[in-house]
């Protein structure tokens, strides 16, 4: 059977609501589907943070891919945005997604669909819960009330999982994955609670927590590399080491996750407490990457970089951080911002040198993170009104040109402030040490860098703008 005929067959079956038991593939493991409003002509498939293949879309924005020698477990699909999926040998998994609302529209059909629809449901539930916790100020509750509040959220997830297991067949491995999503989001919230509670004295608050508050830690596994694809597991580990690092210095300095002191203690703790090389590499790399991306401290950066290089086991991660460290030298305070070529909304090619003629802050966005893009654009507009001495540039990355223009028009972003980087993202990342959409540059009217590691969402960003005007 040809690939085109297979694709047509699978899509027809999915539209008819094919059952998991009836349509298990006999001749291989397949992943296919349809991308509505695609932003490129391919879908990326990854496993263990390594690219398996780039899968081309056909003229109808559909694709079908046979996974050779599949390993059961978690994979990641990426098309402008990413999401984890679970694949077993002989699955015939079909997906459909609209890029305008990626997570909200992602659905699966075919053999393997129930497992993946459950993962999407749990992911969306976590997003909803996060908004609820902020709106209801749950992190500001006393420890006992807080524990009860998140226990109720956890119980709702447990019921969803139990109902799923009653209706669907699932092996022990997938059940472990689903239970991890349920449990580790709960653990992560417990870990971040002391750092998010707005007490007058954070040290006193930490010391006042009963030891039983952390009883869940005895059930947590800090060294399970098979769970590293899960955002819930990642969040738990990161939140745990942020709190553990603070407890090492909390009587000497205030909590600052971007400080040299915090990251020094964090790297040491990860190195001493984590035994699995993959988990340790993930945590060490995430820590040093975030520090280098957000710090102007050259001496501290050198110290932490050297410490990282001595401890890291992953050669691939070592190369990534080495490149980031070298890129940071391009954007040191006092240097002129690299003269990137940009396209404006009228399709004119310009450069930083031509565009910047007054104090300016520069931020980056992608339609793959719409909530970030909308918040950043709204905040930038209000900041410019408050500080008319400034202009701002909103630079789109990782989108197609047409998708960039459509998104700007759809959300009424100020087109006069919008620019598109048309070369490869790798080039921009290398020139500007850009590895996060949170990075914001502040430059003077000549394009001289005042701060290459600001964050438009930071509570002290306005103060940084004011200080830059006085330099």
Image (tube, rainbow, N blue to C red):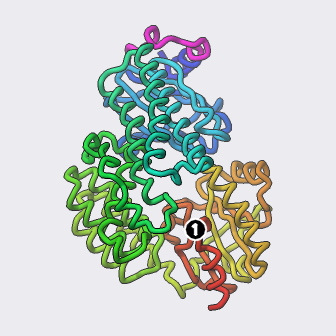
The image quadrant where one finds the C terminus is bottom right
Prevailing secondary structure of the magenta residues: loop
Where is residue 11 shown, x and y percent of the image? 58, 19
Q: Residue at x 58, y 32 (%)?
A: 106
Query: Which quarter of the picture shows residue 264?
Result: bottom left
The relative height of residue 334 versus residue 158 in the rendered view (above or below) is below
Query: Which quarter of the picture shows residue 57?
Result: top right
Q: Is residue 242 visible?
A: no
Where is residue 394 shown, x and y percent of the image? 68, 65
Q: Residue at x 35, y 70 (%)?
A: 250
Where is residue 313 shown, x and y percent of the image? 23, 58
User: As drawn, is 361 to the left or to the right of 55?
Assistant: right
The relative height of residue 424 versus residue 108 in the rendered view (above or below) is below
User: As drawn, is 241 to the left or to the right of 155?
Assistant: left
Q: Residue at x 48, y 34 (%)?
A: 152
Magenta segment boundaries in residue numbering? 12-27
Where is residue 276 shown, x and y percent of the image? 22, 50
Q: Residue furthest top?
A: 22
The relative height of residue 260 versus residue 210 in the rendered view (above or below) is below
Q: Could you say whether the residue bearing mark 1 is in a helix, strand or loop?
A: loop
**Residue identified by numbered label 1:** 458
Q: Residue furthest bottom?
A: 471
Q: Is residue 210 visible?
A: yes
């Amino acid at each position: 059977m040809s690939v085109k005929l297979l694709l047509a067959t699978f899509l027809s079956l999915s539209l008819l609501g094919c059952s998991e038991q009836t349509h298990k593939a006999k001749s291989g493991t397949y992943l296919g589907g349809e991308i509505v409003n695609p932003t490129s002509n391919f879908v990326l498939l990854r496993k263990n943070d390594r690219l398996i293949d780039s899968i081309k879309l056909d003229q109808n924005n559909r694709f079908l891919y046979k996974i050779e020698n599949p390993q059961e477990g978690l994979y990641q699909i990426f098309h402008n945005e990413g999401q984890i999926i679970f694949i077993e040998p002989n699955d015939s998994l079909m997906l459909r997604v609209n890029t305008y609302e990626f997570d909200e529209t992602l659905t699966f059909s075919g053999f393997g669909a129930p497992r993946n629809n459950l993962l999407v449901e749990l992911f969306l539930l976590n997003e909803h819960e996060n908004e609820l916790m902020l709106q209801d100020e749950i992190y500001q509750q006393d420890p006992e009330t807080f524990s009860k509040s998140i226990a109720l959220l956890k119980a709702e997830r447990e019921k969803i999982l139990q109902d799923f297991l009653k209706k669907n067949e699932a092996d022990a491995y997938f059940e472990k994955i689903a239970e991890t999503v349920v449990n580790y989001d709960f653990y992560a919230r417990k870990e971040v609670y002391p750092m998010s509670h707005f007490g007058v004295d954070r040290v006193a608050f930490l010391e006042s927590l009963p030891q039983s508050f952390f009883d869940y830690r005895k059930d947590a596994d800090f060294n399970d590399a098979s769970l590293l694809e899960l955002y819930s597991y990642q969040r738990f580990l990161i939140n745990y080491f942020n709190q553990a690092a603070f407890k090492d210095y909390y009587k000497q300095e205030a909590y600052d996750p971007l400080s040299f002191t915090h990251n020094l203690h964090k790297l040491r703790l990860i190195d001493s407490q984590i035994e699995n090389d993959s988990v340790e590499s993930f945590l060490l790399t995430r820590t040093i990457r975030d520090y280098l991306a957000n710090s102007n401290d050259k001496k501290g950066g050198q110290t932490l970089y050297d410490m990282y290089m001595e401890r890291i086991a992953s050669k691939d991660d070592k190369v990534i951080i080495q490149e980031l460290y070298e890129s940071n030298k391009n954007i040191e305070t006092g240097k002129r911002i690299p003269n990137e070529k940009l396209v404006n909304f009228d399709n004119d090619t310009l450069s930083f040198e031509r565009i910047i003629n007054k104090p300016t802050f520069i931020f980056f966005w992608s339609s793959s993170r719409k909530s970030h893009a909308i918040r950043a654009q709204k905040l930038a507009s209000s900041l410019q009104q408050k500080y008319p001495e400034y202009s701002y540039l909103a630079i789109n990355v990782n989108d197609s040109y047409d998708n960039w223009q459509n998104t700007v028009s759809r959300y009424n972003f100020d087109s006069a402030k919008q620019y598109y980087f048309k070369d490869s993202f790798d080039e921009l990342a290398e020139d500007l040490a850009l590895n996060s959409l949170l990075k914001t540059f502040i430059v003077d009217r000549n394009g001289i860098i005042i701060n290459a590691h600001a964050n438009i969402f930071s509570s002290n960003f306005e103060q940084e703008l004011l200080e830059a005007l006085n330099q």
